[in-house]
């Protein structure tokens, strides 16, 4: 399967309509856990406002199609530069048009820490 996009927390946050009915800010993790837990307890999905619309929509409605990728032989320095230059938190590692891994900022920091 050829990667065509990636969905991130910032992609979700950009659709502010899903948060319009909330009185206070909650984390994406809390929002998803609460809504997913509630949906798993129901036999069928019903219309319950913008949160339900969000959970029922395909990821293509939210994903970024501008993929920043690296190969498995990329150096830590190359990946670090991609992360910073493109202001992303994770980079899919692609080989033969397939995602074979993902590297996050934290992974790069751990690699640097091991070198110090």
Image (cartoon, rainbow, N blue to C red):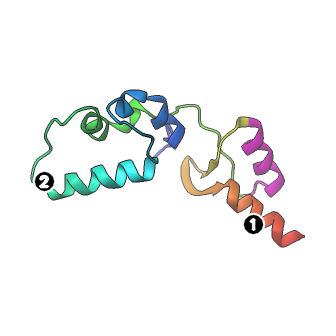
**Which element is circle 1 on?**
helix
User: Residues under labels 2 and 1: Cα distance?
Assistant: 41 Å
Residue 61: mark: none
Q: Position of residue 90 (x, y in %)?
A: 62, 49
Residue sitting nearer the eye, 81 or 113 = 113
Residue 110: mark: 1
Q: Position of residue 62 (x, y in %)?
A: 43, 33
Q: Position of residue 28 (x, y in %)?
A: 44, 47
**Which element is circle 2 on?**
loop
Q: In this rendering, does residue 99 appear at all?
A: yes
Q: Is residue 84 magenta?
A: yes
In the rendered structure, which segment of residues is drawn in magenta? 73-85
Q: Residue at x 69, y 62 (%)?
A: 107
Residue 42: mark: 2
Q: Residue at x 78, y 50 (%)?
A: 80
Q: Residues within 10 Å of mark 1 (few under 14, many from 20)?
A: few
Q: Is residue 104 magenta?
A: no
Residue sitting nearer the eye, 72 or 81 = 81
């Amino acid at each position: 399967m050829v990667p065509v996009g990636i969905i991130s927390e910032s992609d979700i946050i950009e659709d502010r309509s899903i948060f319009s009915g909330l009185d206070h800010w909650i984390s994406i993790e809390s929002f998803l856990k609460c809504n997913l837990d509630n949906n798993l307890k129901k036999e069928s999905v019903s219309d319950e406002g913008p949160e339900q619309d969000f959970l029922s929509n395909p990821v293509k409605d939210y994903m970024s199609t501008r993929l920043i990728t690296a190969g498995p032989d990329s150096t830590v320095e190359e990946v670090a530069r991609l992360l910073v230059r493109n202001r992303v938190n994770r980079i899919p590692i692609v080989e033969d048009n397939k995602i074979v891994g993902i590297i996050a900022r934290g992974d790069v920091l751990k690699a640097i820490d091991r070198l110090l």
